[in-house]
Image (cartoon, grey):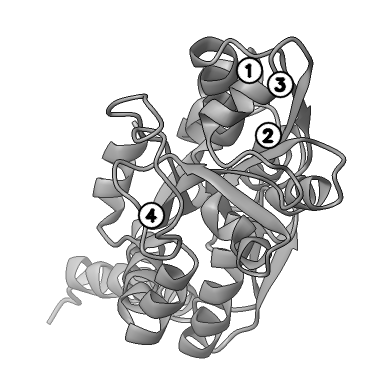
Amino acid sequence: MRPNFYGLALAMLAGLASTLAAPVLAQQAAYPARPIKLVVAFAAGGIADSVARQIGVKLSARLGQPVVVENRGGAGGNIGAKTVSGAEPDGHTLLVTTAALAVNASLYKSPGYTVTDFVPIALAASTPNLFATNAANPATSLKDLARDYKGRQFTYSTAGIGSSSHLTAHYVFRNLLGMDAVHVPYQGGAPAVNAAVAGHVDLVSVSMPTAMTNVKAGRLKGIAVASLKRVDALPGVATVAESGFRDFEDRSWVGVLAPAKTSPDIARRLNAEINDIIRQPDMREQLAAVGFEPSTGSTTEFADYLK
């Protein structure tokens, strides 16, 4: 009988394909193969940093690898975003940032990256913006501030140029109240808050969770919160709408993204893990206590929201 060279060739090709595929499958199954780095695009102590650290602890336990938070603040979140945009798309380097990612796309002529350089993983939480003054400031409302600083300069700190807190404050104080308001940018929400506590600026405009500790301790005084209704965490602070500006709302969000070309399987796994972390009662309670509204959803939903 003559040998079946055709069948033998097919068998050899099948074996070769199986051999070549094995390392790829093993690599996918092994994820994560080393520690995961969460690059936070702002300084320690801000909302992105806070959420990243809470997620990181629980994500590490779930994935069996250390999750390290690295703060790369500056340029309104652009430095951290640019760092991750050029990272290896293997799921081991992730970006944790805020609404600044969307704002910067139109604010900066050349931020060093585009939104398409990322794969949206999960939208974790959102929170309204808060205006707060040093406790010694006699003002108790936005109208008080406009009256007290009439004819003189007014300074406010934020997490950086182009942050939603910057744009909101600029619009409220300069456009709506007509004040001579001067912006003092910092590399994150925490140092912006510290500037107000120390009296270096007249007011801080910041995402609510970043200022909560100092407000509750009496070192800062909430003047107005940029939500449509009062928030449970600060029931005594009026909304911007209650201050005379109807239907005014400004919310920032915290999201996790990966470099473009990251495997869809890795993206879906990270999305599922982070969503499950956010759904845990203790996590939701921790987030709500400081003014966050927990968020969950698919990678596609986050991508659509980002657009």
Q: Are marks 1 and 2 in contact (CB under 8 Å)?
A: yes
**What residue is at 53 percent from the left and 31 percent from the top?**
142
Which of disc 4 and disc 3 is earlier in sequence? 4
> Residue drawn 63% across and 38% down?
139
Category of crowding for the residue at label 2, using alpha-carbon neighbours closer than 10 angstroms: few (below 14), some (14–19), many (at least 20): many
Locate the N terminus by quadrant: bottom left
* Camera-nearest residue between 49 and 87: 49
Locate the C terminus and report the quarter of the image it occupies. top left
Name the mark on residue 149.
3
Viewer-side residue, 1 vs 106: 106
Give the quadrant of residue 213.
bottom right
Give the residue at x 36% y 34%. Answer: 249
Amino acid type, mark 1 = Tyr
Q: Are marks 1 and 4 in contact (CB under 8 Å)?
A: no
In this orientation, does residue 204 appear? yes
Q: CA distance from mark 3 to mark 4?
A: 39 Å
Nearer the camera: disc 1 or disc 2 = 2
Of helix, strand and loop, which one carries label 1?
loop
- Percent x, y of residue 48: 58, 56
The answer for how far apart the CA atoms under marks 1 and 2 are is: 10 Å
Choose the circle earlier in sequence order: 3 or 1: 1
Label 3 neighbourhood size at 10 Å, few (<14), some (14-19), many (20+)?
some
Give the label, 3 or 2, closer to the camera.
3
Which labelled disc corresponds to residue 123? 4
* First reached walking from the N terminus: tag 3 or tag 2: 2
Label for residue 76?
A: 2
Kind of element beneath mark 3: loop
The crowding category of the residue bearing disc 1, from other C-alpha atoms within 10 Å (few below 14, some 14 to 19, many at least 20), is few
